Amino acid sequence: MNVAFIGCGYVADIYARTLANYAELDLAVVHDKNPQRAEAFSKMYDVPTAPTLDAVLDDSRIDMVVNLTNPSSHYEISKRALEAKKHVYSEKPLATDFEQAVKLVDLARRQGKLIAGAPCTHLGEAAQTFGKALREGRIGKPRLVYAELDDGPIHMLDYKNWRSESGAPWPYLDEFNVGCTLEHAGYYVSQLVAFFGPAKSVTSFASLVVDDKGIEETPTTPDFSVGCIEFSSGVVARLTCSIYAPHDHALRVFGDEGILALKECWDFGSSVGFYPRNRVALKAEKHLAIAHRIGVGMLPVPLVRKVDFGFKVKGANRMDMARGIAEVAEAVTQNRGCRISADFSLHVNEIVLSLQNPKAMGVQRKLVSTCHRPAPMDWAG
Ligand SMILES: NC(=O)c1ccc[n+]([C@@H]2O[C@H](COP(=O)([O-])OP(=O)(O)OC[C@H]3O[C@@H](n4cnc5c(N)ncnc54)[C@H](O)[C@@H]3O)[C@@H](O)[C@H]2O)c1
């Protein structure tokens, strides 16, 4: 299948490197509205550039558009690609506005094309191992989930000098303005929907913790959120996202007979472990709470298959991002259901938007009572 990348920025390098894992996918052409960026990318990966989006969309060899533009452009580019009867694989979020995401999914249906939204973390080896252990009843009935996507205090790091392999700067303005919840929550939400099915409600709190991040403009987008997702199957999940608390990408699912833990969301080969909840183990459980988070002392659950991407992954994540494109391509060629269907992508999009925008998407109580802060004890100084 011939694919075209629209957007040759920071993430496009990760896609290009992981695309090499799939011989059936051919990167036929790339386009970026910034010609210098397209040129640098084209040189590095030896792929032709197209001068305009229209040139890509008019090219009958192209079957799928991979939308790697900034989130504010996702809707327009995906819409144009679907109108031109191309399949679409879009970086997250599918759209920054839920109504627009609905329109994209409707359009794809009318055009008889697939649209799928990243991330594809639920297709990774660790997530597949986790899902199998849940299906096999390893922890009995799963009831409660704690998932963390804390990414550390990025504004205290040297983020202005981060560069991709082909030289694209890390788009910090965009990252801070789009917000860490919209950028990151999907990495776990997609897994949770794959494990537990659709959700029926989201209750969230989101806030800006650090307004001065050393950039040209003051961001207003929350850099912290905590939300609770109620799944139709009865499971309840608490998901936290921030770019302030120290790095913690752990997932824990608590069941009547045990706890399943996954250490690192952004590693398809992350360790997965099990802690029993029998009478003896329960006595030690309160002392092990921290250990659960970092995977100490767990009984390893072997991955369902070895992780062998066949390429060197650099940087903060070890995710085979092109796997999502390959899944869509295979679903098309085999005429089978896609594991990143339009409905799935839309549902993940709605949950993530609700986590980030509780005021716009749902109810948030404004408190009517207030009080004075209790004075410290005299002996506390
Ligand atoms: N930066 C990361 O680490 C990272 C990781 C995973 C996913 N993502 C996601 O990938 C997407 C892109 O992020 P990025 O970090 O590569 O951003 P980026 O700013 O580095 O790159 C985006 C590129 O898209 C181009 N572009 C924007 N609008 C366009 C349009 N209308 N037509 C043609 N080109 C256009 C820009 O010129 C830019 O070169 C985002 O959705 C982001 O959430 C980013």
Image: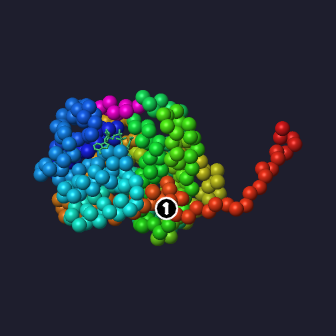
Q: For the view shown, which residue lies furthest in the right direction?
A: 378
Whether 110 is among the magenta residues is no
Location of residue 44 with respect to 346 vertically, above or below: above
x, y percentage for residue 222? 53, 48
The answer to whether 243 appears left or right of 133 in the picture is: right
x, y percentage for residue 332? 20, 60
The answer to whether 304 appears left or right of 219 in the picture is: left
Give the crowd class for mark 1: few <14, some 14-19, many >=20 residues within 10 Å: some
- Of 296 and 55, nearer the camera is 55
Residue at screen point 45% across, 32% down: 159
**Amino acid beneath label 1:** Met
Q: State the extent of the magenta-drawn residues as a range.
A: 162-169
Residue at screen point 21% across, 46% down: 53
The residue identified by callout 1 is 361
Q: Is residue 246 visible?
A: no
Location of residue 231 with respect to 39 vertically, above or below: below
Residue at screen point 80% across, 50% down: 374
Q: How many marks?
A: 1
x, y percentage for residue 196? 44, 65
Q: For the view shown, which residue lies furthest in the left direction?
A: 60
- Of 221 and 342, nearer the camera is 221
Location of residue 321 with respect to 94 vertically, above or below: above
Please identify the quadrant where the C terminus is shown: top right
The answer to whether 276 appears left or right of 187 in the picture is: right
Residue at screen point 41% across, 46% down: 266
| Residue 70 image-quadrant placement | top left
- Mainly helix, strand or loop, the magenta region? loop
